[in-house]
Amino acid sequence: MTIYLLDGTLEVDIFYECEDQDLEDNVCIRVIESCPPEERLLRAGKTHIYLTPVQARKLGEMLLSAATQSIDC
């Protein structure tokens, strides 16, 4: 699943990493920035963040809660 943010310069992919199925943190968030270095949020153009299933669910719940609050205001 991919979403593009910040006028398309920030690509965020979220996926289950099958190759790491034996590891506890096998849900991957990959962030790719396609902007000039001086405009980057992160030092590297591509970053991977690995989460456990529990952490991924918690992050999802937090995003849904914030979205609900935003709509309800």
Image (spheres, rainbow, N blue to C red):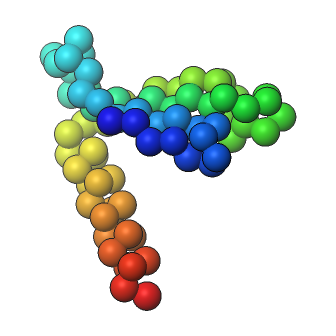
Q: Position of residue 25 (x, y in %)?
A: 27, 29
Q: Quadrant for residue 53, please give it.
A: top left
Question: Could you say which quadrant of the image residue 60 lies in?
Answer: bottom left
Q: How many marks?
A: 0
Residue 48 or residue 1, whichever sits in front: 1
In the rendered image, the quadrant that contains the N terminus is top left
Which residue is painted at 64% across and 37% down in the image? 9
- Of all residues, the one furthest to the left in this rendering is 22
- Where residue 20 appears, as percent x and y from the top left, is 24, 16
| Near-viewer residue (22 or 18) | 18
Query: Is residue 48 in sight in this rendering?
Result: yes
| Residue at the image position 24 percent from the left and 27 percent from the top | 16
* Relative height, residue 34 to residue 67 (above, below): above
Q: Identify which residue, 2 or 28, lies in the foreground.
A: 2
- Left or right, 18 with respect to 71, comes to left
For image coordinates 31% across by 64% down, the residue present is 64
Instruction: Looking at this view, name the residue that lies furthest to the right.
Output: 38
